[in-house]
């Protein structure tokens, strides 16, 4: 008898990762698809498609089929998953026949949104599809002892959502999910540059600004960056020098909402778990947690220690894959 391959998928708003129990991470690329509108064919998926954002002629459209952690366009997500499974299979050079798949969903997802994620994964040939809550996957991936009766606090700042969860005994004790993450910070930067300088910049440029000179609200040595975009008055290309303090200011409101959501979750912690939280603190994961100065800022603002996990971009995928071994126990506790 052949044993079915087992894989975990982190179908994220910004990045999709596939984890195989035996091979580790076998796919890790942006959740972007490029489509030829004349033929309706998929031209590129992942990194190749992300490179094309904002640069294509009219008949080619680049789409991010997930928004806020859930599926915004079902057909394109299903097509993207088919391509991803093919690429992942090629990369390990082993045919994955009817794999058993675990896929994570944001805590805040509705039943309909969860079903759509499950159906999209089923449609690309999975034998069985299990769902796991993203914060639980993140905690497993961050090597937290989720099965034990101690409080594990995870803060997962992704592209579309931030989820803050207290996990104990393999289940979520308390969780706040807000639809604010790295994408919102990019949007804040686009709006700021537009309003202040009448300069229109693209998503990719905004993300680059955030990563290079974006800081959480902490003191830092100011840096600047030359930014290119389209002048809204003349319609011509223009380069402006932007300072890190301006970008910091532009992102502050969204970052404060993330802070509020962490505080609200901690305030809901059952008294018996409060001691653990004070001792062990909060673990940051997700790409958004890599923002310059974020860990330091949060440490100043909440009185418990704040740690950054080793692999913030991969933790959810690793945890999703590893949860295969404990999926039955976990599901019983989650449901
Ligand atoms: N060095 C960095 N500084 C700031 N932000 C970063 C950095 N690296 C990645 N990011 C941001 O992290 C986000 C992607 O993180 P991640 O891959 O965890 O999201 P996701 O899992 O796809 O999204 P979600 O969980 O919301 O569906 C993007 O917004 C990206 O811009
Ligand atoms: Mg994520």
Image (cartoon, helix red, strand yellow):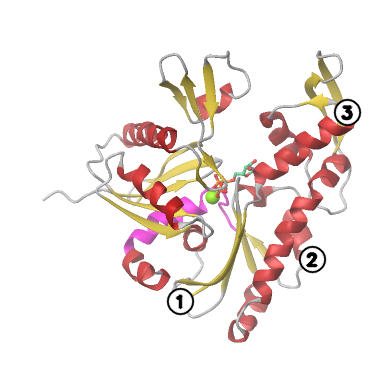
Q: How far apart are marks 3 and 2 (CA)?
A: 32 Å
Residue 150 in the magenta stretch? The answer is no
3D distance between C-alphas at marks 1 and 3: 52 Å
What is the secondary structure assignment of the residue under circle 3? helix
Vertical order, 166 against 288 (above or below): below
Which residue: 76% across, 34% down?
190
Residue 224, relative to residue 25: is it above or below? Answer: above
Residue under label 2: 301
Whole-percent x and y of residue 151? 56, 76
Judging by the rendered image, the residue that carries numbered circle 3 is 197
The disc label shown at residue 169, or none: 1
In the image, residue 255 sits, relative to residue 76, either above or below, namely below
Marks 3 and 2, the one that precedes in the sequence = 3
- Residue 168 is situated, as x and y percent measured from the top left of the image, at 50, 75
Number of other residues with Cα within 10 Å of mark 3, as a class: few under 14, some 14 to 19, many 20 or more: some
Secondary structure of the residue carrying numbered label 1 = loop
Of callouts 1 and 3, the N-terminal one: 1
Per the picture, the main secondary structure of the magenta-coloured stretch is helix
Q: Earlier in the sequence, mark 1 or mark 2?
A: 1
């Amino acid at each position: 008898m052949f044993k079915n391959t087992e894989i975990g998928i982190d179908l994220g708003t910004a990045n999709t990762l596939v984890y195989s129990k035996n091979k580790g991470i076998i796919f890790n690329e942006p959740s972007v698809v490029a489509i030829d509108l004349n033929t309706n064919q998929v031209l590129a998926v992942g990194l190749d498609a992300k490179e094309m954002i904002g640069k294509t002629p009219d008949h080619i459209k680049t789409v991010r089929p997930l928004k806020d952690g859930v599926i915004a366009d079902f057909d394109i997500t299903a097509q993207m998953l088919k391509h991803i499974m093919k690429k992942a299979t090629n990369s390990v050079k082993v045919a994955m026949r009817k794999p058993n798949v675990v896929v994570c969903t944001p805590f805040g997802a509705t039943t309909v949104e969860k079903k759509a994620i499950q159906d999209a994964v089923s449609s690309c040939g999975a034998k069985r599809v299990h769902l796991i809550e993203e914060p639980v996957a993140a905690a497993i991936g961050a090597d937290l002892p989720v099965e034990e009766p101690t409080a594990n606090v995870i803060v997962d700042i992704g592209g579309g959502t931030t989820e803050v969860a207290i996990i104990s005994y393999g289940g979520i004790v308390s969780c706040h999910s807000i639809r604010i993450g790295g994408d919102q910070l990019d949007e804040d930067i686009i709006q700021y540059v537009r309003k202040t300088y009448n300069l229109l910049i693209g998503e990719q440029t905004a993300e680059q600004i955030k990563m290079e000179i974006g800081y959480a609200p902490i003191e830092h040595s100011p840096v600047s960056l030359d930014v290119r975009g389209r002048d809204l008055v003349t319609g011509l290309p223009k380069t402006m020098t932007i300072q890190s303090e301006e970008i910091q200011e532009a992102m502050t409101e969204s970052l404060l909402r993330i802070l509020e959501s962490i505080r609200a979750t901690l305030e809901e912690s059952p008294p018996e778990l409060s001691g653990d939280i004070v001792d062990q603190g909060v673990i940051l994961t997700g790409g958004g947690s890599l923002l310059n100065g974020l860990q330091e800022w949060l440490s100043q603002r909440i009185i418990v220690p704040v740690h950054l996990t080793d692999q913030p971009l991969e933790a959810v995928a690793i945890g999703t894959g590893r949860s295969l071994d404990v999926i039955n126990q976990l599901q019983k506790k989650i449901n």
